[in-house]
Image (cartoon, rainbow, N blue to C red):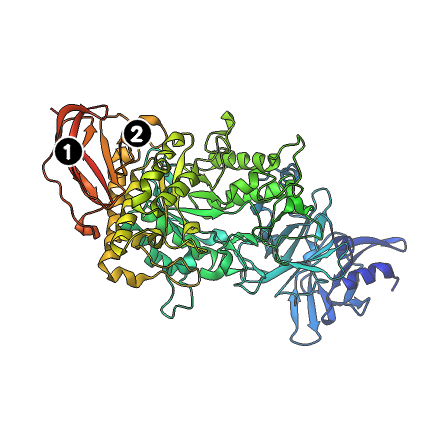
Amino acid sequence: MKKTVSKNNIEALGSGNCMDPFSLLGLHSEKIGTKQTFVVRTIQPHANKVRILYDKGHKAIEMKRLSNDGVFEALIPDKDEVFSYHFEIEPNHGQLYTQIDPYSFPSLLSDFDLHLWGEGTHIRAYEMMGAHTKKVDNVFGTHFVVCAPEAIRVSVIGSFNDWDGRRHVMRKHHAQGIWEIFIPGVGEGDQYKYEIKAHDFDLPLKKSDPYGFYAEKRPATASIINDLDRFTWSDEEWMNKRTKNFDKALSIYEVHLGSWKRKSDGDDFLSYRQLAAELIPYVKDLGYTHIELLPISEHPYDPSWGYQTTGYFAATSRFGNPQDLMYFINECHKNDIGVLIDWVPAHFATDDHGLRLFDGSHLYEHADPRQGEHKDWGTLIFNFGRTEVINFMLSNAVFWCDKFHIDGLRADAVASMLYLDYSREEGEWIPNKYGGRENLEAVRFLKRVNEILNQEFKGIITMAEESTSWPMVSRPTYLGGLGFDYKWNMGWMNDTLKYMEADPLFRRYHHNQLTFSMIYAFTENFALPLSHDEVVHGKKSMLSKMPGDTWQKFANLRLLYTYMYAHPGKKISFMGNEFAQWTEWDSEKELDWLLLNYDTHKGMHTLIKDLNYHYKNNSPLHEVDFEWQGFDWIDASDVDNSIMAFLRYNKEKKDYVACIFNFTPQVHHNYKFGIPKEGEYEIFINSDSHYYGGSNVENNNLIAKPGKWHNHPAHLTLSVPPLSGMLLKLKSKAK
């Protein structure tokens, strides 16, 4: 038979080094002599013989072996138009099997998808990229698409091809740097990676799919094909009524799923479905409105808690498959609990199977370590100047809200994104094009994320963990802001904890640490965090931070929580805070649930439950969190007694709550406070109550009388319990 392909091309196919296998493999009409003849070629490295079958009833044609590497070819002289065919393969070892040729399928990517990708505006790139099961010409298989613009060759390797990079070399779209192939017969549950031949690398890189929806449980690193759309949602009622909670209660329970609770042996995780059965009723009983999950995207290293991600589109397999997480979220919604996730656009893990040097080049990260390396965390920084990165991270934010019905994203380490000199000494960073320290590309990216999420999803919440004074973090982009809905109030957290850790005898010298927060309280839409970062790495648990003997520690902590719920701003608290763990959070162990057998810890738990209830059911505590109209001082100046009091108003200013705090162990009898209206008042929260483990200093028949005090027309005299917070409201109509 006349040779139809050059020796060099045969060698390139056999070694897996052909850059354009679709030009040689599959069905082609080629001129052989003076006649156009159909030629079929395939690469089957492990085959002893290969036959081609086409028209029904037609005898199989034995294909000719062109090389020892398994390149086979057959001429089909009796056909004059394109036809369907498949192979019958006799392997070197094993049984005879049939296979449809992946090189018989055209490109499945639309020009529109490629256009959006090229301009960096593909907000649903996950619908194009990654591994998607589908039927093509009534043939079931999986369509693989990956971005690797600098790669010489990209192959899909997996459990379906013996991890052999010669067998499924992909087609490249050169203008966009995208590679694709449709592989018949490959489906859900199959494991795969991309084998990438790169410049300056002797051996091929073996990478997990950046857009993979599921991954093997660590330490294994392969991606797993998963059809996300096979889950049936039943949370329409929640999704239709979902809001940003600006004028509603927003009380968030922050959770690390791996250490909230573990199986009875203590060594294995609860699954997403087991967590749905245990965590959701617990959170609902405590009265939280939302759960915030520490990052649930796939990560190789447990002690990173998910903040060093390798699989941005894959729900971690530690707790089950993606559908199990969907079930958990669906059940949360059916119980009127929103779900937020920590999202990490600031940096990514350096593991070899991840994004680092993905195609042999710095595709996702900056090449210069002065821009691309976070020395504090040992991670790499996204280059938001690249369209590939914009497509990747923008669509990732959309992905979680779209496919998983997530109600909001809390962006981690935003400050590190905004500043080019973040945690860097002089000479260790590169200024922007104007000579400044602002990361202009990252700022532009964050604005776009918030704009797109607001356009695409009703009631979605975005929060920024931003620890500097960057202006207008939670203001709309059309006003020049970053567009987040909320900003974590790190200043309030730091000042308040420093104050609470001080011995009450000396708190008089630190009174400004309490009052200072009200100077800037309404410059942003703040959320008040007592997060995981405050109870780890030697910072002590919330209870252990408190000064004094055991009774005073508990009293101080009850006071802190009551103050937090009264202060303007939404509420965030890490798991274990609610029952006052003695020890720091340990991500390798479950919480100290046995503490709930002790009255003092159970009392703290009851206080949190009551605070959440009254926070939701008293509109002055949540309706006007971000404007002065919702706040008024009663007394901010009693430094000597470390007493502070203020009012919280609802929108119409008809209802209000008086909030009174004593930060010393001394009881103050007959203490007079100004109040807006005369009449009878009731204390609906007293952190000193015996229900919570307090000393139960009582106040009966609280009648506000006329007479100006603290710039208010009436006054109220009461006994102020030690180390306590009290919330009062008017019981009877004013005279």
The residue beneath circle 1 is: 717
Q: Dot 1 surroundings within 10 Å: few (below 14), some, or many (20 or more)?
A: some
Q: Position of residue 508 (x, y in %)?
A: 31, 39
Name, please, the residue furthest toward the bottom: 93
Q: Position of residue 314 (x, y in %)?
A: 52, 54
Q: Residue at x 25, y 39 (%)?
A: 661
Is residue 217 placed above or below 692 in the rendered structure? below
Name, please, the residue furthest toward the left: 701
Question: Of residues 461 and 710, which is closer to you in this image?
Answer: 710
Give the quadrant of the C terminus: top left
Is residue 276 placed above or below 519 in the rendered structure? below
Q: Residue at x 66, y 32 (%)?
A: 435
Q: Disc 1 marks which amino acid?
A: Thr
What's the CA distance linking mark 1 and mark 2?
Answer: 21 Å
Question: Which of label 1 and label 2 is nearer to you?
Answer: 1
Q: Disc 2 marks which amino acid?
A: Phe
Question: Of residues 168 and 664, which is closer to you in this image?
Answer: 664
Judged left or right of residue 547, residue 67 is right
User: What element does badge 2 sit on?
Assistant: strand
The residue beneath circle 2 is: 631
> Sequence order check: which comes first, mark 1 or mark 2?
2
Q: Position of residue 389 (x, y in %)?
A: 62, 43
Q: Dot 2 surroundings within 10 Å: few (below 14), some, or many (20 or more)?
A: many
Q: Does residue 36 show up? A: yes
Q: Residue at x 13, y 44 (%)?
A: 698
Q: Does residue 561 show up? A: no
Give the quadrant of the N terminus: bottom right
User: What element does badge 1 sit on?
Assistant: strand
Residue 7 numbered tag: none
Judged left or right of residue 164, residue 272 is left
